[in-house]
Amino acid sequence: MSIIDKTDAVLEPSAKGFDGPLLEVRDLHVEFHTRDGVAKAVNGVNYSVDAGETLAVLGESGSGKSVTAQAVMGILDMPPGRIPQGEIKFRGQDMLKMSEEERRRIRGRKIAMIFQDALSSLNPVLSVGYQLGEMYRVHQGLSKKDAKRKAIEMMDRVKIPAAAARVSDYPHQFSGGMRQRIMIAMALALEPDLIIADEPTTALDVTVQAQVMDLLAELQREYHMGLILITHDLGVVADVADKIAVMYAGRIVEQAPVHELYKRPAHPYTKGLLDSIPRLDQKGQELYAIKGLPPNLTRIPSGCAFNPRCPKAQDVCRTDIPPLHPVTEQDGTELVGRASACHFWKETIHG
Ligand SMILES: Nc1ncnc2c1ncn2[C@@H]1O[C@H](COP(=O)(O)OP(=O)(O)OP(=O)(O)O)[C@@H](O)[C@H]1O
Ligand SMILES: [Mg+2]
């Protein structure tokens, strides 16, 4: 699929002078009507991203990371998907209340997305230069020649060696890492304000993963964009993210500035994820794994959705849904940017 909408017109969204967050997702709910029942994939997600900020969204498979992002990007399959509730504000304007036309001006131009699998996102029968150049021809009305020049420039930006010589090559002639760089170039072409990268390096070799991630982080700083980085790899985010939102069964169960989350998790689920990271200094030891599996989203357990897997679960956890509660020091001092949806967050972080 194409990253951009080709019918996009050259228009600026209004709301100039707005000084709130670049993107603010509020109480977002997404459900899917399936033969098995209603799958509640997203159940009241709140997050925000500022210009120049990187939010990492973390969680096991099926926790609702991609569905949330697809809702933001406006590419959710509807039906079977439905957004019964919530707001997705871009520079203060709720995109869910906009006309399709208005939304289209933001998507692709102001918000771009990078997917895991570049091969299926790029057109196999068109050269990468043509596809990159298309961004400039369609959106900026550049001539073929100028668009090609811009394509080469962007390929250079994302550090593709011998860009000028390779501009006419086809996607399959590039390595996975190089293809992912091309996807980054496509996403950046129109200088969006926000990039959503959904597992952008998962399909790559470990060494290449780090290079692509470093590149993305570098360009994000340079362009002062907001970045939402979706991953289930805690190792990847430590160096690039500012803050982390941990998702479980469609809810954010913990959020924190990145280094604080690693130092002192305030939710048993986060603690479990951290304990499952292989560590070089513990070679040979058996790796911890959170017991059990994430719930079936048509039958989410009552109370805290994590309770059947939680080593600390007590009666209240099976009956009451814990709200996302601000996290404080033992003396009550607020820990800025921290929140946990655990009834026993105090014990978890301080205990
Ligand atoms: N088109 C769809 N129809 C039905 N259910 C869907 C659809 N898209 C997503 N879902 C369901 O929504 C839930 C959340 O999926 P999502 O893709 O957001 O998970 P994720 O956190 O991104 O996981 P992963 O790490 O595997 O990418 C899953 O249970 C999935 O099966
Ligand atoms: Mg996903």
Image (cartoon, rainbow, N blue to C red):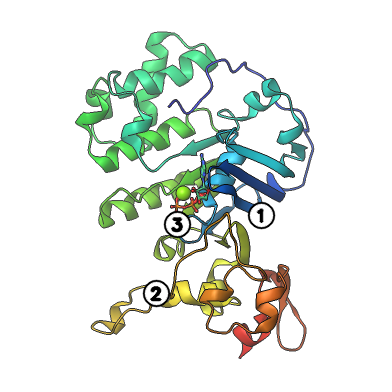
Q: Which residue is mark 2?
A: 276
Provide residue 207's location: percent of width, then percent of height. Answer: 26, 56
- Which residue is at 57% across, 84% downward? 312
> As rendered, which of 115 and 163 lies closer to the eye?
115
Q: Residue furthest bottom?
A: 351
Q: Considering only order in the chain, which callout, 1 or 2, is on the residue closer to the N terminus?
A: 1
Provide residue 31's location: percent of width, then percent of height. Answer: 62, 45
Disc 2 is placed on an element classified as loop
Using the numbered discs, state the Cα–Cα distance from disc 2 to disc 3 in whole angstroms: 15 Å
Three-letter code, disc 2 = Ser
Foreground mark, 2 or 1, reads 1
Using the numbered discs, state the Cα–Cα distance from disc 2 to disc 1 in whole angstroms: 26 Å
- Which residue is at 53% across, 48% downward? 36
Q: Considering only order in the chain, which callout, 3 or 1, is on the residue closer to the N terminus?
A: 1
- Which residue is at 28% across, 51% downward? 208
Horizontal arrangement in the rendering, residue 181 relative to residue 216 (left or right):
left
Q: Is mark 3 within 8 Å of ligand 1?
A: yes
Let me know if residue 224 appears in the view: no
Residue 276, compared with residue 72, is above or below; it is: below
